[in-house]
Amino acid sequence: MEQPPVKRLNRELKYQGTILKIYEDTVEANGHEAHWDFIHHNGAAAVVPVTKEGKLLMVRQYRNALDRYTLEIPAGALDFPEEPKLDCAHRELEEETGFKTDKEKMEYLISVNTTVAFCDEAIDIFVARELEPSRQHLDDDECIDVEEWTVADLEKLIFEGKITDGKTIAAIMAYARKYHVE
């Protein structure tokens, strides 16, 4: 079935923050004019760090939007819009976990659009192996604890509703399926 066209008539910047630009779009949809919110995000990258024992390194950090601590895979925003996502994932691995590996040892896993209804954020997720101890490089306002987890225990937390971060759920499930990890 063919979808009726949607035509953007106007896009007006309403707010510009550190990592987001918020717009009001005026569109014509189904013959009617409507106003839609649109959030632009320059993009991000994330990484599934795998220890030599096969456990995943996870980060526990406070998330202001949820007013609670969350358990997630390491991730971060691109430093600039054209930054290669592999470079970002490589940087975030060491910054957040205190472990590093060679970029050549990182493998693309999946891409995720986080909130397709109103935001264009896209996150590429990589798998990192052959991790070497280094040190965390946290921002002044970051407090991140690093924890080792089995895939099975992380899946249990997902199905119990204790891990709710979309990129983390997608990454763990894709990793488990691709590498047949239980």
Image (cartoon, rainbow, N blue to C red):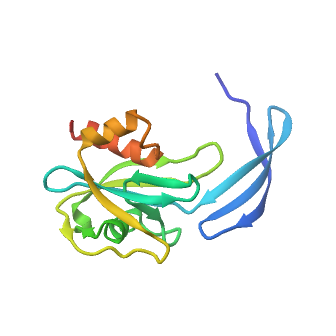
Quarter of the view holding residue 101: bottom left
Q: Is residue 33 left or right of residue 94?
A: right
Residue farthest front in this picture: 68
Depth order, front residue of 148/25: 148
Task: Identify whether 96 is placed above or below 171.
Answer: below
Task: Identify whether 20 is placed above or below 53.
Answer: below
User: x, y (%) of residue 106?
Assistant: 26, 59
Residue farthest left in this picture: 53
User: x, y (%) of residue 67?
Assistant: 56, 55
Q: Quadrant of the C terminus?
A: top left
At x 51%, y 72%, the residue is: 80
Q: Is residue 78 left or right of residue 19?
A: left
Quarter of the view holding residue 16: bottom right
Q: Quadrant of the N terminus?
A: top right
User: x, y (%) of residue 12?
Assistant: 79, 60
Quarter of the view holding residue 156: top left
Depth order, front residue of 171/35: 171
At x 47%, y 78%, the residue is: 140
Depth order, front residue of 130/86: 130
At x 21%, y 39%, the residue is: 181
At x 52%, y 48%, the residue is: 114
Number of marks drawn: 0
User: x, y (%) of residue 122?
Assistant: 51, 53
